[in-house]
Image (spheres, rainbow, N blue to C red):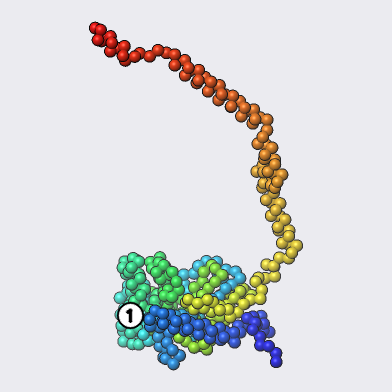
Amino acid sequence: MSPTSTALTVRVGNGSPYQLNHEQTLKASQALLKHIKSSEKEKTKATGKKSLIKDDDSEEDEDSTSPPIWLVLTTKKHIVDQKRLKPSKIPLPHLLNSSANTTICLITADPQRTYKDLVASPAFPAALSKRISKVVGVKKIQNKWTQYEAQRKLYAEHDIFLADDRIVTRLPQLLGKTFYGNTLKRPIPVSIQPALAKTEGKKIARTEAEKGETRGAAQPKAVAAAIEKAIQCTYVHLSPSTQTSVRVGYSNWNAEKLAENIEAVVEVLVEKFVPKKWRGVKAFHVKGAETTALPIWLASEMWVDEGDVLGEEEVKTIEEAKVSKRKGRALVNGEVEGEKGKRQKLLESNDDKLDEEIKARKEKLRLQKLEAMVDEDADSFIPKASKKGKKSKEIAV
């Protein structure tokens, strides 16, 4: 019987040189979920606190309270040159925010009353309206929630934060590290303004009358559809680094669901965001909030292009150039490296000119001491008036 393959890199012949191994992904998901549950049980026994992870036979309706599972992408080069404030959407086969108990805070452009009335209107879906617990404008955020304690309170009161895509780039400065220190509750951009009309493929600007009629908001059904679409996706926050983490599930899921979400996210990440696609990927790992990362795909080559690899002769030439450059700098500064340089410095420091200067300095100090001694001897022979003589003269008088 031939041994089973355990390679983390699979070559295929259908266009892409690599692909994700489904068996390895499923195996890593099973091992990770099993480890998280066993660790949670041990923690529950030690502390006596109730576990946030439910058993397999329980209903999976409280995903937001379970620890999340992350897919970690490691690239060979920086994925982007600049940090992007707007995250990118990735659709999932299994939704992350399917629970009806999760609360939503909607941050809108001003005036906020326009969007409060829109959410409360009969045309807006009632089930989604119940989940939106707060609608707040950007001016109110600026006036009321700029202090750290107020931000922490707002952060803890809601599970999901949505933001009008027209003002989402202003929020990092207003909400600070409380919201943007991690990616758990960063505001998700959503388009809630009416779409522009098109004529022959070109968008037509709105008139003043249309702006007053719509007040900058789309129809209730269109806004509800945009919100539903936003909470059904996961998001990738790109920054100039070689590592990017994306939430793909929760620890109370089964391994099959988690593996399907991982494969869907990997496909979009590689095809849409990674330069050179699979050639630019170094590794994929899956991890929990407090666990080590398990590899599900590792690149067999650490470089992107063949031109990035240097041969032995090229490396030797570069090293010799570095050595000669250092020697050239040393000679310009009047220094010589090695043992010869040390001897040369000693010889230069003991030359005749310096010895004569030291000898003259010592002779000068000796003469000064002699003069001081002569002055002290001369002062010792000067007679001093006695106090007894003055007293005897006064008595005689």
Near-viewer residue (190 or 244): 244
Residue 176 placement, left or right of 29: left
For image coordinates 58% across by 80% down, the residue present is 296
Task: Kindly tell me whether residue 246 is visible in this rendering.
Answer: no
Is residue 14 placed above or below 379 in the rendered structure?
below
Residue at left 67%, top 84%? 12
Task: Characterize the local packing of mark 1: few (<14), some (14-19) or many (20 or more) Cα atoms within 10 angstroms.
Answer: some
Q: Position of residue 63 (x, y in %)?
A: 42, 84
- Locate residue 178: give its quadrant: bottom left
Q: Where is residue 377 in the image (x, y as percent from the top left)?
A: 48, 17
Image side of residue 237 versus residue 160, left or right: right
Q: Label 1: which residue?
A: 133
In this orientation, which residue lies closer to the viewer: 214 or 103? 103
| Residue type, numbered disc 1 | Ser
- Quadrant in the picture for the N terminus: bottom right
Residue located 31% across and 87% down the image: 122
Q: In this view, does 68 lie to the left or right of 12?
A: left
* Extreme residue in the right direction: 313
Q: Quadrant of residue 120?
A: bottom left
Q: What element carries label 1?
A: strand
Residue at 66% in and 80% down: 17
Q: Which of 146 and 358 is in front in this view?
A: 358
Camera-nearest residue between 39 and 33:
39
Give the tally of numbered discs: 1
Q: Where is residue 140 in the image (x, y as percent from the top left)?
A: 32, 69
Q: Quadrant of the C terminus?
A: top left
* Residue 5 visible somewhere in the drawing: yes
